[in-house]
Amino acid sequence: MKQQMNIVIAGHVDHGKSTIIGRLLADTGSLPEGKLEQVKAMCELNSRPFEYAFLLDALKDEQSQGITIDSARVFFKTEQRDYIIIDAPGHIEFLKNMVSGAARAEAALLVIDADEGVQENSRRHGYMLSMLGIKQIAVLVNKMDLVNYDQKRFDSIVHEYTEFLNEINVVPNSFIPVSGMMGDAIAKLTDNISWYSGKTVLEVLDSFEKEKPPIDKPFRMPVQDVYKFTKDGDNRRIVAGTIESGKLSVGDMVVFYPSGKRSKVKTIESFNTEKITNIEVGNAVGFTLTEQIYVTRGEIAAKDNEPAPQVGKKIKVNLFWLGRNPLIKKKEYFLKLGTAKIGMRLEEVNRVINASDLNAQIERDRIDRHDVAECVFQLNKAIAFDKMEDGASTSRFVIVDEYEIAGGGIIRDVLEDKYSAIRDKVMLRNYKWEKSIISNEQRAEKYNQKSTLILITGPKEVGKKNVAKTLESKLFADGKIVYFLGIGNVLYGVDADIKHQGNGNKDEHLRRLAEVVHIMTDAGVILIVTARELSQDDLEIIKTTVNPDKIETVWVGEDVTTDLVYDLKVPGKLDIEASVESIKQLLQDNGIIFKPW
């Protein structure tokens, strides 16, 4: 089978990218039969001069009618290999393809107009290529025919752009004087550039080294989903995803991050094939586990005996911002990395760099369009990732603002936050956890409920305990496995060895409470806990220890006295029955207990 390589072509608007692509398609004989003649005839019919860019437009027209070609992935071939060009018509599309993994370029052609020279976008694209780790780059100085193939003009652009690339540690493989329109130096050298003795574009492309699959790197597989089968007694739970690096075998112990849960690979599943026991990078895969554990989309599977990914809620990143609105503090965004999608906020801007001139600004509280920044993000929950040097695909991310991809970049490091120590304890707990042979699903089916923490909080003397105990009584009467746990039960029991007064030990009190909650919910119980005026920070400590999907927060009373983001607000002692009915409705709406209509 012929080797295949993904390349990206980038450059300022109207610098001739489409003409270069059209010429590559024509000169390598990669066009559909008769397409070149058809487009030339159409130009003659409409009395307009033929341009090779029209070939790409014609192919895109066919694609819009459902024929033959994907406009984002243009194919051409040489004797050595097949090429897929990821056309980057704009920053957003380029970033979306590169960072989200829809297409990963192994090399790049960067086009600069000989007449217009180096533009802002020329520098921005160069910076973006550097940031995304693309090291094989050829710079095409296009439209040499417009400057009469002037060597001095070519040398001037080479000098100016090389100075810029040196500052961002990019060393291009070559600079090539070309004319997409006339065909100079695309597939062959011509007399027009007799002063140039280097390689043609096709020769440079063929000289690029094919990126080796990261089979020798640690195993990484972002979890796409977990599929459960029930038909004909089939009780398999298949963990599915695409292997980004390394390899996997039956019998391997896998650990899922950030949860730290682990189990052994029982089978590797495949459709309509012979039984397989090994699989490696690049393959979509499903596997079953010897012990059933609860894992979710967005976690990263790694092998127990290999280096683990980084885990954190506070991360330092290099970011390229392309959104129409600036990236600002105190606004919620989404970060997408692999299969994970997590809410986040901009916490700190370390420095902002103008990608077109590399000027750095230190004191900034926002990131504007086309800025490159080194900044700190605070995530709503922990994420697993690798540093760029350890694994490119598990370090790249995009930022979503108002349903649109508005920026992207790479994670540079994980930073300590107030939950780091608790998270480390939780990961160790999950790693060492002795699992029951009864799964969470079996308990839920037997008890006819989903295990949940109902966290009831609010000011003093608003009826929190009355609401909680009445709710417990009503759920118990309905046949639910339910338990009310007053905070005092923990303070004078599990917490008897630490001081109760003041806030000095509050985090440890909450951590221990959360561990009790974890045990109770693992047993399938609906647990009701009351506590006075919990803040969002308090809730984050509990969520670090307990699966956030198993927590419902209820604020009691009219006055909200903390920054807690709650799921439901009830009147409390002003109407106990109405409060209980509202909570019960919340549980039904969220599928925790059965809704009879």
Image: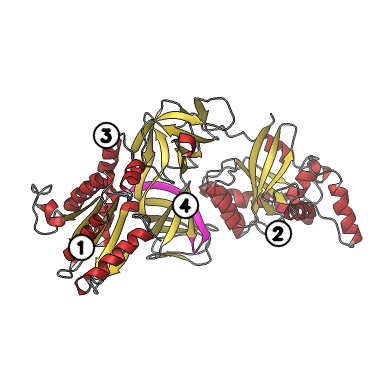
Of labels 4 and 2, earlier in sequence is: 2
Mark nearer the N terminus (4 vs 1): 4
Q: Amino acid at mark 1?
A: Thr
The alpha-carbon separation of the residues under discs 3 and 4 comes to: 32 Å
Q: Earlier in the sequence, mark 3 or mark 4?
A: 4
Give the CA separation, mark 4 to mark 2.
32 Å
Is residue 471 left or right of 218 when viewed as pictured? left
Q: Which of the two discs, 3 and 2, labels the residue nearer the N terminus?
A: 2
Secondary element under disc 3, as helix, strand or loop, is loop
Identify which amino acid the numbered label 4 is placed on: Lys
Q: Which residue is mark 2?
A: 14
* Numbered disc in front, either 4 or 2: 4
Q: Are marks 3 and 1 in contact (CB under 8 Å)?
A: no
Across and down, in percent, residue 21 comes to: 73, 48
C-alpha separation, residue under disc 3 versus residue under disc 1? 34 Å
Foreground: 134 or 534? Answer: 534
Residue bearing mark 1: 470
| CA gap, disc 3 and disc 2 | 63 Å
Pointer 3 or 1: first along the chain: 3
Circle 4 is placed at which residue position?
Answer: 336
Q: In what quadrant of the picture does the C terminus appear?
A: bottom left
**Is residue 7 one of those drawn in magenta?**
no
* SS at circle 4: strand
The span shown in magenta is 401-416
Element on which disc 2 rests: loop
Task: Inspect the image, locate mark 2, and give the three-letter code of the amino acid beneath it.
Answer: Asp
Q: Secondary structure at mark 1?
A: helix
Q: How many neighbours does mark 2 have within 10 angstroms: few (below 14), some (14-19), or many (20 or more)?
A: few
